Amino acid sequence: MSKLKILIAGGGLGGLCLAQGLTKAGMDCEVYEKDPGVLQAGYRLHMNGDGGGALRACLPEPLYELYMQTSRTNPRRELAVMIDSRGVEKAVRPHIGPPNDPVRPHTAVNRRTLRQILLSGLEDRVHFGVEALRFEQDRKGVRLHLADGRVAEGDLLVGADGINSIVRRGLMPEAEPVDTGMRMIYAKSPLTPEIAASLPEVLFDGFIGATDASGAFAGIGAFIPRRPIAEAAAELAPGSVIDPVEPYMMIVLSRGFAPLPLSDRELREASRERLYAMMLGLTEDWAPALRGLFERIRVSSIFPQSVRVLKPQEPWRAGRATLLGDAIHAMPPTFGAGANLALKDGAELAARLIRAEAGELTLTEAVADYEEAMRGYAYPILEMSVNPSYKTDFSKGPGGRAV
């Protein structure tokens, strides 16, 4: 039995899930992340059995329990619900993913909290502020060239470095991201007990899409942790860096695939105050309860995002470099599936690499089997997610229906 050395470019959710799974099995891995630390890159993440099952497989039991206890409380209904700007329910759609646990279901997490949980115990393996530039592979191994001049050597390189992946660029330079034209504005609105009591019950379902006749569309998702995050972290992961998080409503405002009132350049250069004013302008005629969510937005939480995707690729020959998550199947947030699939990728690849180190598979067989499986479960969801009608009409898509 030979020991494998796994290099992971990118310390996002999928790469860290893989690193946790390998570490749990006693395998050798190193993670190289170009950012200087855990930056804010979004808020609430919908979780399903794919992502939750991956965390169960890869995390030590205390960290998995911390994930569960810091997830949002059970929703009133586990559905994606479409309402109009008056708050009237129009359509529903089941969440994408395998059947959920009926007792303690996977619900939603705060993205930063989940990433901090995934970093726990990996402090010596994750190298922040180290950018991967390029790689070379041959029959003996793979060499990853880093921006600080070092060259890391290993048996396999995993590109978990997002939609602008340098690993994908080296493997399949023709696979360029495609701009969907969708532009989104993310923000958080506070959710105190008093505010929660004043809101319609429908806003506490799994995930809400609100739309009006002008084409404005708001995704709205509550985040109320099952247990205070600082309290749970102190008990289950003492010594880990887990920030406290107060309950909030995540708001994502767009006009689907239609342009926002600001040009792309204006969106990039706009102050948060200008983006806030645009959000208020797009929702000025909405019902008071919905309008209040926008009026209470914390301006400091606002940021814009352009949505790009990767088209499914024809099968490629397995080698000493592979890809996971947004590096190979970046998709719009239509079904809340992207993060779950990245976590699943990490767990699926970890399981096969563990078998390879045990001598049950060759490394090439392990990588090829993972890549075939990944294409089978991720590409169908990617193809559905780029269908424009699924984004703003919840009666369409798997299991959707009008009310």
Image (cartoon, helix red, strand yellow):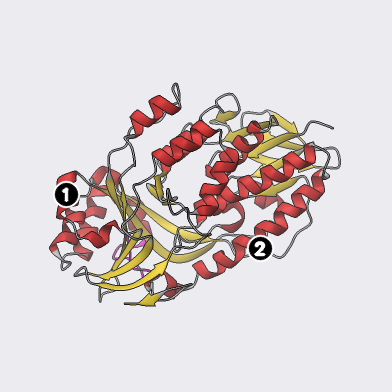
Q: Is mark 1 on a helix, strand or loop?
A: helix
- Label disc, if present, on residue 376 of the rendered structure: 2
Residue at left offset 47%, top offset 61%: 332
Residue 144, image quadrant:
top right
Q: Magenta stretch: residue 272 in it?
A: no
Q: What element carries label 2?
A: helix
Q: Magenta stretch: residue 257 in it?
A: yes
Q: Which amino acid does label 2 sit on?
A: Gly
Whether residue 10 appears in this view of the structure is no
Q: Residue furthest top?
A: 239
- Label disc, if present, on residue 91 of the rendered structure: none
Could you tell whether 369 is left or right of 330 in the image?
right
Could you tell whether 39 is left or right of 128 in the image?
left
Q: Position of residue 130 (x, y in %)?
A: 58, 32
Task: Identify the residue under disc 1.
Answer: 195
Residue at left offset 69%, top offset 58%: 373
The image shows a total of numbered marks equal to 2
Report the front residue among 87 and 176: 87
